[in-house]
Amino acid sequence: MEQEKHPALKFFIFFSLLLLGVAVSSVIISASLSDYRFSELISNFDEHPFELLASQAIIHLCVFILAPIAFITFIEKESIKLYLGLNSPINKSVIFYSIVLLLSIQAITSSAAEYSKLLPLGDYIHRLFLENQTANDAFTKAILEDTSISMFILQIITMGLLAGIGEEMVFRGIFQRLFHQWSKNIHFSIFFSAILFAVFHGLIYNIFGIVLIGILFGYIYYFTGNLWITIGLHILNNSAIVVISYLNAKGLIDFDISETNIFSGIEISISILITIFAMQRIYKNRQVGLQTLI
């Protein structure tokens, strides 16, 4: 019988597979964008948003979907459905309260984004993250302001489906499990995975909100043992952002999705109470989650 690999070794192997995914995606992008230099696309993203978003789709597919599948299949030697709990039964009330929770945390994460701006960063780190945030905001704005139907469909596929599926496979499905195996502490594994999830997004001035989402998704996965729930929530959240931004760009609604200071203290307090209640109901209706990740 083959000896079980240490979680630290598994983490190293998985991280290596993620890097391999980056390399493979780079080759595919270079081949498919032969008419452009990738550096030119990056520096002139407002002129080529479709090509850059298509590149992002390739990266998500190679790094966040194919790499996890390879890790689970060839390193863990397990069925993907079994490993991620995709066959685990789902209580309908859990789905309902998970959606309620997703809606209720919007006010909380928006407020958390405001507090993230108060982080006491040094001048160099502040400039570094500010430049990254500014570039990311400009790139996102260029993508979301393109109102062509082809761009809208690609946004849903890339930012909704691929990001939702891939990021949940990586951060909840694998990282959270490996950290739990290593530390034997589920709370540490959930919090640390959520921090990695936030760092990956690179948005230091919204880091508290992203960490909070990562923590809540981590506990939902732990309580239910089925990754489909957090995948669905992630897809729903990202797709809603795409749809709202698209409608705003078309002039059909007047709502800036990037605005954070739009909720009152009372609204935030109500959101906190609803979030606590929804999470309590999810915990009460848990089924197999507490055994799946061990």
Image (tube, rainbow, N blue to C red):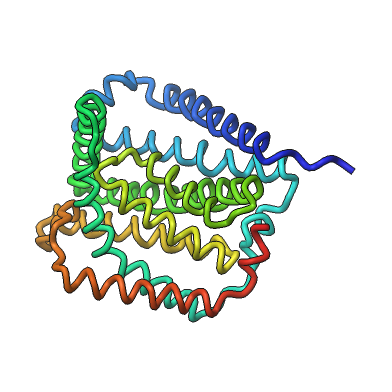
Residue 123, horizontal then vertical, whole percent: 19, 27
Instruction: Name the one closer to the observer, 55 or 103.
Output: 103
Q: Is residue 19 left or right of residue 204?
A: right
Residue 167, horizontal then vertical, whole percent: 47, 48
Image quarter (top left, top right, bottom left or bottom right) of the N terminus: top right
Instruction: Name the one closer to the observer, 126 or 26.
Output: 126
Vertical comparison of 97 with 81: above or below: below
Vertical comparison of 209 with 182: above or below: below
| Count of numbered marks | 0
Q: Is residue 24 left or right of residue 13?
A: left
Residue 63, horizontal then vertical, whole percent: 51, 37
Q: Is residue 166 left or right of residue 3?
A: left
Vertical comparison of 189 with 252: above or below: above
In the rendered image, the residue lying farthest to the right is: 1
Q: Is residue 20 left or right of residue 198?
A: right
The residue at the point 27 percent across, 63 percent down is 106
The residue at the point 85 percent across, 40 percent down is 2
Image quarter (top left, top right, bottom left or bottom right) of the C terminus: bottom right
Residue 98, horizontal then vertical, whole percent: 43, 71
